[in-house]
Amino acid sequence: MVKLKECYGCMKPSIIWKNHEGFRYCKNCWSCHKSNLVAQKPTENLVPVVLPNVKKRPRIKLKSDKQKALDKAYLLMRKEYMNKNPLCNVKASKDCFFNATDIHHMEGRGIKTLTQLTWISTCRPCHTWIHEHPEEARILGFLK
């Protein structure tokens, strides 16, 4: 079932065809509105059109405050960990360049993201190798 909403052109409940700058229009009113937009040329004697007061919806946050705090703590812990462990501990890829650039989370990044016991410092080629070869990585202890 389609929800009917009030059209700002005819002020009748109808199926909304276009939501333009926060104003909803039915198909008929939008075609009239669109033709008026194209046809009008700026003049000095234009009377401003008073449109209904429309409240803009608040934007949804990209990250919650809790996730922002976790990310901030993780970045501090990551920096400290990488300073203590600057070399790749995996050395499984033939392209390994021995300097660590990533942290591999052996048990994923969910609840145990901040648990350093589940971290391994690794270079990008070895980190990619772990995720491309999960069976071998489990045998070697890089995945749990």
Image (tube, rainbow, N blue to C red):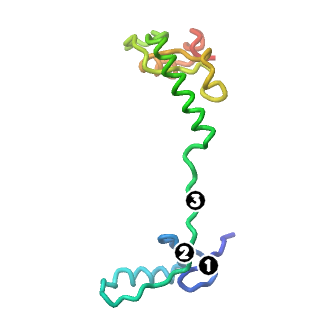
- Image quadrant holding the N terminus, namely bottom right
Q: Calculate the distance from the C-alpha at mark 2 to the C-alpha at mark 1.
A: 7 Å
Residue under numbered circle 1:
6
In terms of sequence position, does the residue under pointer 2 or pointer 1 come before the other? 1
- Could you say where residue 143 lies in the image, as x and y percent from the top left? 59, 17
Left or right for 8, reference 99: right
- Disc 1 residue type? Glu
Residue under numbered circle 3:
58
Find out whether the residues at labels 1 and 3 contact each other: C-beta distance under 8 Å. Answer: no
Residue under numbered circle 2:
24
Residue at horizontal 56 percent and vertical 76 percent from the top: 53
- Disc 3 residue type? Pro
Residue at horizontal 60 percent and vertical 37 percent from the top: 67
- Image quadrant holding the C terminus, namely top right
In terms of sequence position, does the residue under pointer 1 or pointer 3 come before the other? 1
> What is the crowding at mark 3: few (fewer than 14 residues within 10 Å), some, or many (at least 20)?
few
In terms of sequence position, does the residue under pointer 2 or pointer 3 come before the other? 2
For the residue labelled by badge 3, is the local secondary structure a helix, a strand or a loop? loop
Residue 79 against residue 36 in the figure, above or below: above
Closest to the camera, between mark 1 and mark 3, is 3
Q: Calculate the distance from the C-alpha at mark 2 to the C-alpha at mark 3.
A: 18 Å
> What is the crowding at mark 2: few (fewer than 14 residues within 10 Å), some, or many (at least 20)?
many
Residue at horizontal 60 percent and vertical 32 percent from the top: 70
Left or right for 72, reference 126: right
Q: Which of 67 and 126 is in front in this view?
A: 67
Residue 73 against residue 118 in the figure, above or below: below
